[in-house]
Image (cartoon, rainbow, N blue to C red):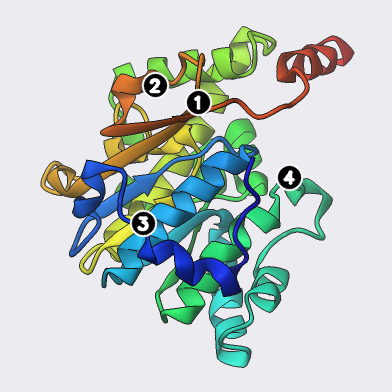
Amino acid sequence: MAALLPPLLSAAVGAQSSPYPWEHRLRGDAIALLGETHDNQQQQQLRFEILKRAIDAGWRPAIAMEQFDREHQADIDRARATRPLDADYLIEQASRRHDAQGAGWNWDYYRPYVALALEHHLPLLAANLSRKDAEQIVHHGYGAVFDAATIGDLELERAPPGLRSSQEKEVEEGHCHALPKDLLPAMARAQMARDAVMAAVLRAHAANGVVLLAGDGHVRRDLGVPRWLSAAALPRVLSVGFLERGVTDPPVEAFSEVIETEAAARPDPCATLRRHARAR
């Protein structure tokens, strides 16, 4: 499997012709949601190449990233003002990588996107709801994190009942049926809050085009971020799922387009979740 291209060598990527007919949509005021399986290096490489080609062709979108929590936007902006082209410094200042709760992102995968934004002076946006805030929502509801005006702006209380039930099913299956049934509504509520927050970031920066880099569960059109965008914005939305062969959830129908790769080698995640469930 090819290693990720380091930022200083990535210029060669832009010279490649596009292998995907839908790449022409990555221009103007497009709202592009590019998914991922977080630990799949091949997917990270392919996705970076796609975005690099679009930017080399002249697209200048804002880049929103799940890997940065929304409260770190000021850290991103301050790091850019202090060291405008230093991707490592920005990641150091704006990520939670020294916070045990925030462990998990492989920054070798995401550094090229940060460097790309800095090189081309593109807005770089912290798009995610933090784990801490998500846990507050699980245990205490939306009001533990958002004021009434924000809850209204995000339309969290007006989520369609079908969306809630579908998210509960996804949470249950995503956690290998290891969660207590009575926890599912609260977990689904936190997932919907994440999607709504990401959608709000996209809406605020979509006039000149915007890209969201996030997991496949967030970019799917049926349940994820697109469900929180306006009907008027949906024709501009391109949702690309990066799926591993043999995986049926999420289904290919959940995305505008799909790229399939081989599965990454990893331990069985369900075994870990079931051990934790037994421990509880």
Please give the label number shown on residue 104: 4
Query: In the figure, is residue 202 to the left or right of 171?
Result: left
**Camera-side residue: 131 or 151?**
131
Location of mark 3 (residue): 211
Q: In 3D space, how far apart are the residues under numbered discs 1 and 3 (Cα atoms)?
A: 24 Å
Amino acid type assigned to the residue bearing label 1 in the image: Ala
Label 4 or label 1, whichever comes before in sequence order: 4
Residue 274, x across and y down, in percent: 78, 11
Residue lying farthest to the right in this orientation:
279
- Badge 4 crowding class, 10 Å Cα cut-off, few under 14, some 14 to 19, many 20 or more, is few
Residue 115, x across and y down, in percent: 55, 72
Q: Nearer the viewer, mark 2 or mark 4?
A: 4
- Badge 1 crowding class, 10 Å Cα cut-off, few under 14, some 14 to 19, many 20 or more, is many
**Camera-side residue: 25 or 223?**
25
Amino acid type assigned to the residue bearing label 4 in the image: Gly
The reply to whether discs 2 and 1 touch (Cβ–Cβ < 8 Å) is yes
Location of mark 1 (residue): 188
Q: Where the C terminus falls, by quadrant?
A: top right
Q: In 3D space, how far apart are the residues under numbered discs 4 and 1 (Cα atoms)?
A: 21 Å
Label 2 or label 1, whichever comes before in sequence order: 2
The reply to whether discs 4 and 1 touch (Cβ–Cβ < 8 Å) is no
Q: Where the N terminus falls, by quadrant?
A: top right
Q: What residue is rendered at 40% in x and 45% in y?
A: 34
Amino acid type assigned to the residue bearing label 2 in the image: Arg
Label 1 or label 3, whichever comes before in sequence order: 1
